[in-house]
Image (cartoon, helix red, strand yellow):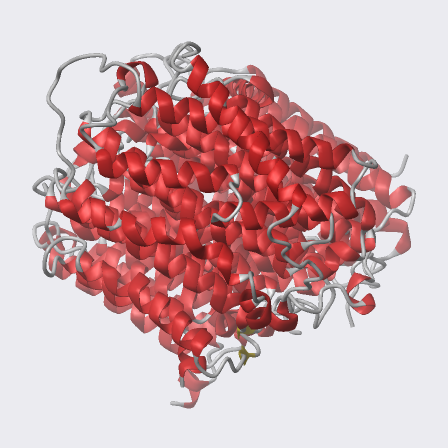
Amino acid sequence: MVSALLSWAWLFTLPGLLLTGLGVGRPGAASLIGPVMIAVVAVAWLVGPRAPVEVVRAGWLPFLPDGSFHLRADALAAVMLAVVGIVSTCIYVYSLAYMAEETPASRRRYFMFLDVFVGSMAILVLAGNLAVLLVGWSGVGLASFLLISFWHDRPGTLAAGVQALAANAVGDAALLLALVLVPANCGDLLTLQTPGCLALPGGATLLASLLLIGAMAKSAQGPLYFWIPSAMAGPTPVSALIHAATMVAAGVYLLVRTNAVMATAPRVAAATAIIGVLTAVGGGLASTRQANLKRGLAYSTVSQLGYMFAAVGFGAPFAALFHLITHAAFKALLFLSAGVVIHARHGREDLASLGGLRRVLPGAYAAFLIGALALIGVPGLSGGFSKDLILEAAEERGVFGPLAFFGLFAGVFLTGWYIGRLFFSVFHGPRPDSEPIHAPSPLMQWSLVPLAAGALLLGYLEWPRGILSGVLGDTVAHAEVVHFPSLLGFFAGALGMAGFAIAFRRDRAAVAQPAAAVEEGGWVGAVASLTTGVSARLISAHSGRLGRYALVSVLGIALILLLGLLSSLFGISAPLPASPGVRS
Amino acid sequence: MNVLASIPPPLGSVLILVLGTLVILLLTGRLSNSPTILATIGVLSLLGAALPAMGGDALTRVSVLGVVAAGLVGMLLVPSAELHNSTQRPEVAALILLGSTGAIVLATAGELLSAALGLETLSLSAAVLVALGRGARPLEAAFRYFVLAAISFAALVYGLGLLLLATGSFAWPRPGVVDPTYSYIWTIGVLLIGLGFAYKLAVFPLLWGPLDAYTAGAPGLAGFVMAASKIAAVVALARLAAGAAVPMAPILIGIGLVSIIWGTFGALAQREVRRMLAYSTVANAGLMALALGCGPEGRAAAIFFVVIYVLTILLAFAAMAGRGTGPLPFGEVRGEGLSATRALGLTLALLSLAGIPPTPGFWAKLAILDASWSALGFWPTLVAVIGGVAGVLYYLRPLPDLLALTRAHVSSAPAPAVWFAGAAVVVLGLAPGFAYAVARLAIGG
Amino acid sequence: MNAESLILATSASLMALGSAGVLMRRNPISMLMSIELMLNAGNLVLVLAARIRGLVDGQSAALIVLVLAAAEAVIGLGLALALFRDRETVDVDAAAEVRG
């Protein structure tokens, strides 16, 4: 019963969506049904029978090699859904208070978008094959765009949302290709790595690369990080949702789910690890230069996801998943307590306009501190356990010898530094002005408590006993064992705290200038301006002059006749049916 | 009764439509003041035309039902169509029926001369339908559409002559019946006929006229023109490519790829919904042309795609109907005061066009990508994939504004066309397998 | 060169002349006349084919095309006239509003 319910858990978001859409009750209250029920069902499955269920309806999309409607409710999906459900529930409750000043219609719209977001994520998590995965995958992208552009009449929010769409489009393209090029009967996410399924030109390397590109786009890795800072244009609880439970987690989840494919393509695995390490370090460095509280946290997410990607690249998917879970708790906590601060200061997010809030916002202060310490990986807190696992994997199975390990290790110092910088700039030092603050409502503060508990305690899922790895069983390969207390963990924690301490010394010294709402630099800007240039050239051909149009039409017809004649002259026929992807 | 039963199904549909046209033309004076009765007669004619087709083969059924759906949406929008003069409503209704007739003949014709006749009927009705829109823009666009259509029709007639010269008949080309002495003449003839059909599909290099017509015509009428033309053109091209794969398939693939790129870049530059939809039509036509060159699987995918695409675009145009013929800039979507039904309809249409599952546009795109991969391999499929996913960058831009319906709605009149097209899109989204099975049957495989 | 080839060449030249006319003239009436020329090039081939193949199909087709050409001319002239009334210019390229 619970198992069957679990595979259809994504449907629980529909009643909330409908009720909120129809305007029943307090805006948003009905939407809570979705995440609460997902969390309840997932937890019930985990403590209860733990019987995996597969739903397969063949012939759903008859034109695809594997077009069955295929759901898979197993331990990995349940664990992921539990995280999604619980974190989303906290964020929903928080949002009820946070968005209270919006108009009722606007609140309804907000919660409906959240429902789409969570429902799509649930489909993605429960997907048994690539076709169903893509349904959730695209839904998550759409919802993130709508939520980032939620305040649609503020300047820059649409551009920010379109940036997220652009990154998503790259990932969607990769997964679409993966979907059409796997041979018949191979769309199943767990059997993608079997030799029969890799019998395609490019083989395992191509398939693993496509999955990697898809995951990079969703998880903002490597060059595809560009949409993350602009995505801060959305309401703060949305940032928490994107960064903890739904959007960016999807990429890591995909890689964990299809980890066996990567195991057959060592070069792609190495590339994953390198991208992860570079992103971990680069994201950390970028975070230390942000003038905006939310952007600092955003780059922190990029950096932490780099750790997870590196872990997948090292062949330690369990470590990646474990870090994903603990990160969901402490990053949601950090964002939501940042939201309390922003709310209290009437929407100000720039570090220069925050400061000295320790005494007036003690709840947020404590919550942010717990989140920060967990993020740094202080031994004994959740982040400490999971990050150590990744560091150990890096040490054992490094890429480029010890370089990857040193990169990640140095990243811990950066982590301490950037989060300390944000923490001290916001809560310590003098108040920049004496404007009265907007006191946080109890609902907002209470919704932080479960997340704080998670940030403190989630690590004990793996120590002293491997509860999580036991539950997951063979759905995720795990050779890693948590060592606690360990020398490595101690050194890493000490390094992180050193960074934290340095940040305290430097305090508010290095506050950079606020950045533009949408960053248009780097390769993204180049691609965007190239596209704009080509488009402008192209539409200038549509001059509205009939003579021109007729000329091009006639010349085009002549050219096509010539090509047709040439091809029949030289016997070039259609490239059919000799083809690379012929299926039986 | 035996005489009636012996009429072939498409001919029955055509007869009923012509009868409806005559009735409307005879009663023009009375009907110009009662748009509801006018629309009712039109709708009944169209529904009546659908009946005989049910006895036909799958190709007839798909073509007739598709064209009838386009005609129905157009007809339901006649009472609210933006015209120079409201006394022209009966003419518009008659032209919709005539245009539907032409499209049905083009798609189901037994030989190519009839197909040419159908094509010209459709072209002329379409040009006048666009021209009747209110304001100066529709007239300008209609004239360009007309002249360019006439050029491609002249090419088609020339091609017919060459084909007759080469084979001695107007039959649809079949492989292996060409007199070797005339093989080059045959090749040119087939290509010219194919290009004549391709004008209706709006692919490069014949995209200019349709692009303007879709941009500037009254929304309901432009939607009908676009929908009926695309269905008929895809079916006709599929039949042509089935029999003459040798010159047609590589050319279709080539112009398909160019059109995908052209339409995508063009749509990315637009800041206005109407023109963006028009450009994106070129990209989508490119996808269809690409699929048409990909063997039987590809032709089935193209027919599947065109059915879904046409219903989606009808939904989009129906949602915009009644607001005039001018451009609709992205930033002003909200100020338009679309009613909730229309805004949701437009949202659904844009989501489907952008290919967001579970809307049918996503399934249609998948079918084409799969066919392209099976037949052509990686690179052409990559172009199609990029063209496909780039759609989100232009289709979804109006969405945040569109969904924020906070003010009182200007037009809250019932929108039967939106409901009809919306229901069709929802059904296709939920049951893609059925539509694909029909498309497979239609190409005879 | 036999008669058939000569006729075919003539029709091709007519087609080319018609196309050139459409491309070079900016007066709507001249454009319509050039299109008539292109259609008649097609008719010539149809009649030629009928003669070579000894069928009446081509001749009847040519008649049908003539009728279509007449219909096209009527609508074309109507549109051209309406456009002229609206713009008061006989240049088809003048003042394009729908573009880009």
For this view, does A174 lie left or right of residue A502?
Answer: right
Q: Residue at x 75, y 63 (%)?
A: A193
Q: Position of residue A104 (x, y in %)?
A: 11, 46
Q: Residue at x 53, y 25 (%)?
A: A499
Query: Quadrant of the image for the C terminus of chain A?
Result: bottom right
Query: Quadrant of the image for the N terminus of chain A?
Result: bottom left
Q: Position of residue C49 (x, y in %)?
A: 74, 50
Q: As displayed, is residue A342 above or below residue A113?
A: above
Q: Could you say which quadrant of the image residue B286 lies in?
A: top right
Q: Position of residue B402 (x, y in %)?
A: 26, 40
Q: Is residue B161 visible?
A: no
For this view, does A241 lie left or right of residue C88?
Answer: right
Q: Nearer the viewer, residue C96 or B123?
A: C96
Q: Residue at x 39, y 34 (%)?
A: A161
> Count of labels shown?
0
Q: As displayed, is residue A476 above or below residue A243?
A: below
Q: As displayed, is residue C84 above or below residue A90?
A: above
